[in-house]
Amino acid sequence: MPRHSALVRVTHWITTLCFFALLVTGFEIVISHPRFYWGETGNVLPDQNGWSRYLHFQAAWALVLTGLLYVAAGIATRHFRRNLVPAKRDFSLGALAAVIASHLRLRRPDQREAWSYNPLQRLTYLLVIFILFPLIIWTGLAMSPAFVSAVPAAVTTLGGQQSARTIHFFVTLVLLLFLLIHLAMICLAGFRNRMRAMIIGRGESQEHL
C-alpha cells in the first residue's frame, strides 16, 4: 500500500503553496500597520497593499476549497478514522509522554512508526485540521466587509473586526510554529524518503520511511 493516497498528496502540496502565499502576503499586510487592537476600535489607514490583499484573498479561497475537498474525501474514505483518530489507549499520559520523550531525544522512528502516525502526531494534525484552520478561516472572513454585512454574528462573536485581526495573526504564528516543527521532524525521520513518499506515494524502502 502507498504511504499516502493520491488525494492526500495533491491536497498537501496545494495547501503548502497556498500557505506560503498567505504567509508572504500576510507579512506584507502586517508590516504596513504592525499594531493590533481588540473590539472595533483601531487605527484605520489607507490601503497601501492592494496587490498583497488581492493575492491573500485568492490564496485563501484556494486553501478553503482544497480543505473542503480533503475533509469530504477523508470522511468518505474513512481516512481520518483509520489514520488520524487516536485509539483509546493513545490518550493516556504515559503514551503521550513516551512520544514526547522520544522526540526530545531526537530518535528516528522505527519501521512500525514509519507507516503510521504516533499519538502526538494524530492529535496535532486533528487540532490543525479541525480547529486552527477553521479558526483562521473564520477570523479571515470576519475581516471582509461583504461577509460582515451578510453574517454580522460571525464578527460580533469574536468581539469585533479588530479582535478578529488579532486572533488571525496569533493563530498564524501557531500554524507557522507547527510548520517549523513539522519540517524538523521530516528531517529527523529522513527527508529524502519522506519527501518521496509525499510526492509519489512510496519511499525507497519501508525501513527508512
Image: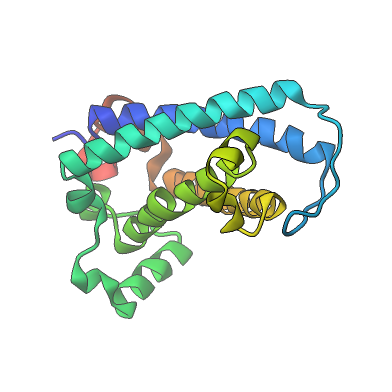
Residue at x 72% of width, y 51% of height: 162
Question: Between residues 78 and 9, which one lies in front from this camera angle?
Answer: 78
Identify the residue shown where x is 48% and y is 52%.
Answer: 132
Would residue 207 be found to the left or right of residue 131 on screen?
Answer: left
Vertical comparison of 111 with 195: above or below: below
Q: Quadrant of the N terminus?
A: top left
Q: Work out whether residue 196 can be spotted.
A: no
Report the label total: 0
Indicate the position of residue 5 as horizontal and vertical percent values.
Answer: 22, 32
Which quadrant of the figure has residue 205?
Answer: top left
Percent across and percent down for residue 201 are 25, 30
Tell which of 42 and 85 is nearer to you: 42
Query: Residue 146 at what x, y percent from top left?
Result: 60, 33
Q: Residue 202, how many percent across, how many down?
A: 24, 31
As displayed, is residue 35 above or below residue 76? below
Which residue lies at the image location 27% right of the left edge and 29% below the top edge?
Answer: 7
Asked if residue 80 is positioned above or below residue 51 in the image, the reply reads below
Q: Measuring 68% from the left and 55% from the top, which residue is drawn there?
A: 163
Relative to residue 14, is residue 70 depicted above or below? below
Depth check: give the residue in front, 60 or 185.
60
Quadrant housing residue 209: top left
Residue 85 falls left or right of residue 158: left
The answer to whether any part of residue 145 appears in the image is yes
Is 12 left, or right, of 30 in this rendering? left
